[in-house]
Amino acid sequence: TALLERTEALLLVLGATAFTAQAMLGLVFVLYGTAIALSGRLPAWVGWSGAVAGAGWLAGALVVEFAVIVPFTVLVWVWTVVLAAVLVRERRAEHAHA
């Protein structure tokens, strides 16, 4: 039983670390999305959609529920691709007007 108790303690620490890391990742996207939205350099919807996806990720980590984290993680992945497309489009528009 001592081995089982040590294993359970280790799993508890690892779980707490994992959800803390997930919360930090969610917070990064909340801040990054908000910065993009407020910068005025890109369409505000791009930033706010990233901030919302990050907030969902953060909320899932705070309630310690992977069933909430996973869908928002996918949304952040999609948002990253959309952000890249918007950045490429904006860059091409800058070059076309130069």
Image: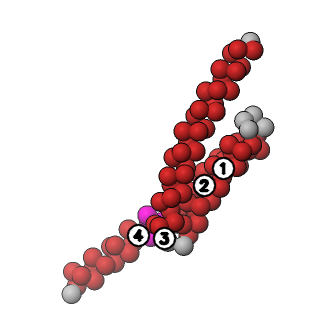
Q: Are marks 2 and 4 in contact (CB under 8 Å)?
A: no
Give the residue at mark 4.
Answer: 15
Give the residue at mark 2.
Answer: 53
The amino acid sitting under disc 1 is: Ser
Tell me if residue 18 comes above or below residue 48 in the rendering. Answer: below
**Mark 2 or 3, nearer chain start:** 2
Give the residue at mark 1.
Answer: 49
Q: For this view, does 38 lie left or right of residue 13?
A: right
Q: Quick one: SS at disc 4?
A: helix
Q: Are marks 3 and 1 in contact (CB under 8 Å)?
A: no
**Mark 2 or 4, nearer chain start:** 4
Give the spatial CA distance, label 3 vs label 1: 21 Å
Q: Is residue 35 visible?
A: no
The amino acid sitting under disc 3 is: Glu
For label 4, the crowd category at 10 Å Cα-Cα, with few meaning under 14, some 14 to 19 and many 20 or more, is few
Q: Are marks 2 and 1 in contact (CB under 8 Å)?
A: yes
The amino acid sitting under disc 2 is: Ala
